[in-house]
Image: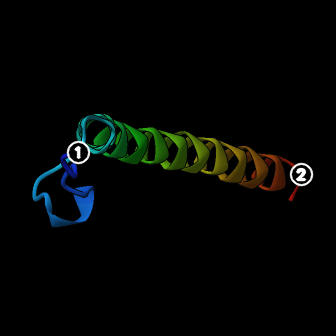
Amino acid sequence: MQKHPTHKSAKGFTLIEMLIGILASVAIPQYSQYKIRGYDAHSKQALKMHIRRRNILEYVG
């Protein structure tokens, strides 16, 4: 009976490892852009609130 070689001596990537790498190469830049858009939207909203508060204080004061 022949012995089958073990995978420990094999070099390279499995199909699952390749798929994870491909998905990560797409998902990581998309996530970064998602975070940037979130920070941008938050900053715009905070600036609008600051301007509104300042205008109210100028009107009252």
Instruction: Give the structural element (helix, strand or loop) at label 1.
Output: loop
Q: Residue furthest right?
A: 60
**Amino acid type, callout 1:** Met
Give the x, y percent position of residue 34: 45, 38
Question: Residue 20 sits in which quadrant?
Answer: top left
32 relative position to 41: left or right: left
Mark 1: give few (<14), some (14-19) or many (20+) Cα within 10 Å: few
Dot 1 corresponds to which residue? 1
Front position in the image: 44 or 25: 25
Q: Quadrant of the C terminus?
A: bottom right
Instruction: Give the structural element (helix, strand or loop) at label 2.
Output: helix
Between the residue at mark 2 and the residue at mark 1, the CA separation in whole angstroms equals 94 Å
Q: Quadrant of the N terminus?
A: top left
**Residue at coordinates 78% horizontally, 51% vertically from top-left?**
53
Mark in the foreground, 2 or 1: 1
Mark 2: give few (<14), some (14-19) or many (20+) Cα within 10 Å: few
12 relative position to 53: left or right: left
Give the x, y percent position of residue 16: 33, 38
Dot 2 corresponds to which residue? 60
Q: Residue furthest bottom?
A: 9
Front position in the image: 47 or 60: 47
Front position in the image: 39 or 34: 34
Q: Is residue 22 above or below residue 47?
A: above
